[in-house]
Image (cartoon, rainbow, N blue to C red):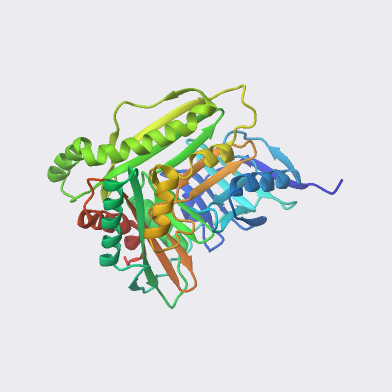
Amino acid sequence: MSHLIPVTTTLLGGHLPLLDLLSDDTSLSWVRGDDGLVAWGEHARVSVFGPNRFRDARNWWHEQLKTFSISNSVNGAGTGPVLFSSFSFSEDEESILIIPKVVIGKRGNKDWITWIGTQGQPELPTTAAPERVSEFEWQSGSLSASEWKERVAQAIEIIKSDDLDKVVLARDLVAKTDSEIDVVRILRKLAAHYPQTWIFTVAGLVGATPELLLRLNRGMVTSRVLAGTIRKTGDDAQDLPLAASLARSSKDLEEHEYAVRSVAHSLEPFCSSTNVPEAPFVLHLENVMHLATDVTGVITEAINHVDVFTLIEQLHPSAAVCGTPTQFARNVIQNLEGMKRARYAGPVGWIDARGDGEIGIALRCGLIEAGQIRLFAGCGIVAGSNPDDELAESEAKLLPMKMSLERG
């Protein structure tokens, strides 16, 4: 037998806030408020493609786990070796899996560190890395705003004349720069303005998603579904009536119902019981409000080997990022959207050695490529949609990432 690689997890004392521990483009994060995971360095990385990409990812992760000798004095979700994953929306594009060398975790009053290798416990930085500010030149993405509105209008006509209930159409916006983009600065700004979201970065994809595709912990699964959006004014006196109108909007309630139904239907075969609230609540973010529902379930004990990969394969793509019926909506996206989504709207997050983890949907995000960052936003189109309103909604959804690139 070949020599096994030590993986050590131990409790950690005081340290900087999680995101202030990061410093470079090998950084990885999944942070909400004060809790989550950050990591750096790469022990191993792989790309997967195709219709079996989730199973291929599981197989690769399990093969990697066989090479480890794990010493874990902390236990619990997110301790021990961790796999950070960023899956593509479509099966024909690249998904990226990374096992970091060092992981710092925090949950409540418990902090821990995991590292791979024979060296002693790594020293952590005592001061946050200085920020680098880039100047950006904004350009249209794959389609101009007017072209995208025309595609939305075509989608509405398809919905009215065919068996399509809902389709999600996305658009992109490009920011070019001559300097290196500071991922950590983007993360810090997103965390300061959007503390209710999950702040993530994996392999150049960076963002702040409000939507949790799934959390699996000791047989309990949770999925936060968002569909139905209204832009905030910033004035509480005006935003409270807007929240009430969102909660009564037949168009938004219809869109939300499709998304909730698709998640509940996907989870039911694996659960002995599920709980779907009768009505959504309104999630208030800094720039928008969403209709939100937390679907929960208990994994059936008699079903073996249900892990995060199993559930991702069933849940992706949900109606919240694709549409209903799924295959019809996929075809419309392919024909009308006019761009490659890459890892936008794909599952992103982490999985531990037990198969538990947290996976979000990569929304409110940007993909850093050579000399530029592509920002993405999508809108759920139903029969009652209006192209001008959908464009305004997409602009609101682009604001978090646009703000994160600004000076100040």
Q: Position of residue 190 (x, y in %)?
A: 37, 54
Q: Which of 306 and 324 is in front in this view?
A: 324
Relative to residue 213, is residue 39 drawn left or right?
right
| Residue 218 falls in image quadrant | top right
Q: Residue at x 26, y 37 (%)?
A: 253
**406 above or below 69?**
below
Q: Position of residue 347 (x, y in %)?
A: 49, 48
**322 above or below 293?**
below
**182 above or below 381?**
below
The image shows a total of numbered marks equal to: 0
Relative to residue 272, is residue 339 drawn left or right?
left
Name the image quarter holding the N terminus.
top right
Q: Which of 23 and 295 is in front in this view?
A: 295
Is residue 12 at least partly visible in the picture?
no
Is residue 40 at least partly visible in the picture?
yes
- Single out the residue that lies furthest toward the front: 161
- Single out the residue that lies furthest toward the right: 1
- Single out the residue that lies furthest toward the left: 237
| Residue 339 falls in image quadrant | bottom left
Q: Which residue is drawn at 20% across and 39% down?
A: 249
Name the image quarter holding the C terminus.
bottom left
Q: Position of residue 100 (x, y in %)?
A: 62, 53
Q: Where is residue 29 in the image (x, y as percent from the top left)?
A: 50, 51
